Amino acid sequence: MTPPPRIALTGIGVRLPGGVHGPDRLWDALVTGRDLTGPIPPARWERMLPQLSSDQVPERPWVAGVIDDVDAFDHGFFGVPAHEAARMDPQQRLALEVAVEALADAGIPLTSLAGTATGVWAGVAAPDQAALALRSGAPVRMADLSGLTFSMLANRVSYHLDLRGPSITVDTACSAAGTALHLARRALQSGEVDTAIVIGVNLLRHPGITAGFADAGVLAPDGTCRPFDARGQGYVRGEAALALVLRRTDTATRSRDRVYALVSGSAVNTDGRSPAGLYAPRAAAQRDLLRAAYADADLAPASVDYILAHGTGTAAGDAAEGRALAQVAATARADRLPVGSVKSVFGHAEGASALVGTAAAALAVHHGVLPPVPNHTRLRPSLARLPLRVPTRPEPWPQTSRPRTAGVSAFGLGGSNVHIVLEQAPGTPPAEETAASPAHRLLAVSAPSEVRLRGTAAAWAPVVADADLGATASTAQHRRAHEKVRAAVVVSSAGQAAEALSALAGGHAHPALVGPHTAPEKPGRLVWMFAGHGSQHADMAATCYAALPVFRQALEEARAALAAHLGRQPWRPGEPITGFET
């Protein structure tokens, strides 16, 4: 039986605690093994919940992983009226931001998706906005209603990008984002969509919900999450917003996309009626889940190199998960199975946690490094004899003759479980070799406004300084939308490009900088024309002919059309000039 096609993960948009913004900073946070959680100051509740009186703001400084600047939102860029942006669920605002960032990371111009059957699947579980709107006593307006239903989270993204594919929000508690990814993968495999955007968001807006988790005894009383550790007493809540761009591998190959990892398998199931109760994890169901996911990937469960576990740090959760892994994925191994968790870095992102784990595992597979788990010293006694281990420092990927593989688990509070299987992607095809390279490159920069243009230039300047100028210019030209306000940098080195971008960011002139200018509402078509009194010099246009495939193809088509009228093949750039009148 032919295994289902792998799905390529080509873009990552990230907002996580500790100022982690983008996949590069995410990887840095993972490999350095920092705990980015900390006390939530009371001022945060007061700022985010103005309708609460001072005696309703908790005195206890609970610990959590908190995202910075969650209220900063460019409503004009997203076409949301200011009054609506102020009242809409902030999880929707973050979903819009990370979706756009993931598409930029994937090199997909936003305008290229308009009208296509691109789908959006979102996972979310935090009901804080609905609780706030109903508690405040103020009249409920349409902008509030959009925050009372989770469906709008996916719908906002589909609307902004003018997408025509499925637009679905999933709530299976802590497995929500992973279940959304599973559904998106199925739609890609069936051909229902060519591109899928998967989103996971979790924000802590209402202190009463955190108080409820504390009363339930699942939060660590010492404010530290210690997955699988003998000292673990619970988890720490966390905020997160992530978006992943998924494409079928044939689409990604045709587009020459950079691929972080392949999603080679996935499965969802539920605990059913657990003898320990609705909220208790069930090892038997997790064993079934693992077997189903690796069967879906056409891989033996024991062949997996690394597991990014759910890993909450609770006694019951760690024990059930550890037993399931030992009985399915850690059998017949010469060494102990490496098991990690991101919850001791960012906190438990609940509805978004599966996407945090998937992004982290994909980067680990991509870089070939096992990230450490902070706050871990020794395994729980219940796990000590199992063939499992927890990395406490960055490690090279285990030696293997196969593509690197990793699994990601997420388990919902009510028993909804998901496991994702990731696999190392083949290398990105090299760029086409050209006979000649232009002496100068044109780096296009654009944004919806001059303010955002300067911000983009400021962000690009330090990156361009150390990048391949040709690849950067090509990406800017072909893999980003060209917005209303535009500038161009014409340079011969990455250092010059960084200088010109810095000048643009500061509003200064630079010899290599053209613009900024505002593009016309209806731009004309571009035509290359070499007119006048015949050839101005021998080998005119030879550089363009050698370096630009589209130009070369057009010239060859013109040669073929002229040959019938001239009785001979016209001269092409680079050929000796013989037998022609000059």
Image (cartoon, rainbow, N blue to C red):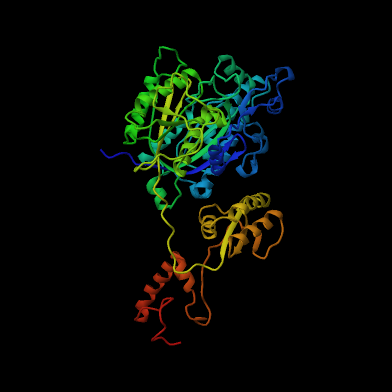
Taking the spot 65% from the left edge, 43% from the top edge, the residue there is: 76
Along the horizontal axis of the image, is 455 left or right of 438?
right
Rendered position, 535 above or below 486: below
Percent from the top left, x then y, of residue 370?
47, 37
On the question of residue 150 being in view, the answer is no
Q: Nearer the viewer, residue 224 or 160?
A: 224
Q: Nearer the viewer, residue 149 or 11?
A: 11
Q: Nearer the viewer, residue 1 or 152?
A: 1
In the rendered image, the quadrant that contains the N terminus is top left
On the question of residue 165 being in view, the answer is yes
For residue 211, what is the image quadrant? Answer: top right
For residue 247, what is the image quadrant? Answer: top left
Along the horizontal axis of the image, is 444 left or right of 386?
right
Rendered position, 508 above or below 170: below
Percent from the top left, x then y, of residue 295?
32, 32
Rendered position, 270 above or below 568: above
Percent from the top left, x then y, of residue 190?
35, 39
Of all residues, the one furthest to the right in this rendering is: 54
For residue 425, what is the image quadrant? Answer: top left
Of all residues, the one furthest to the left in this rendering is: 1
Rendered position, 225 above or below 476: above
Give the tally of numbered discs: 0
Percent from the top left, x then y, of residue 477?
53, 57
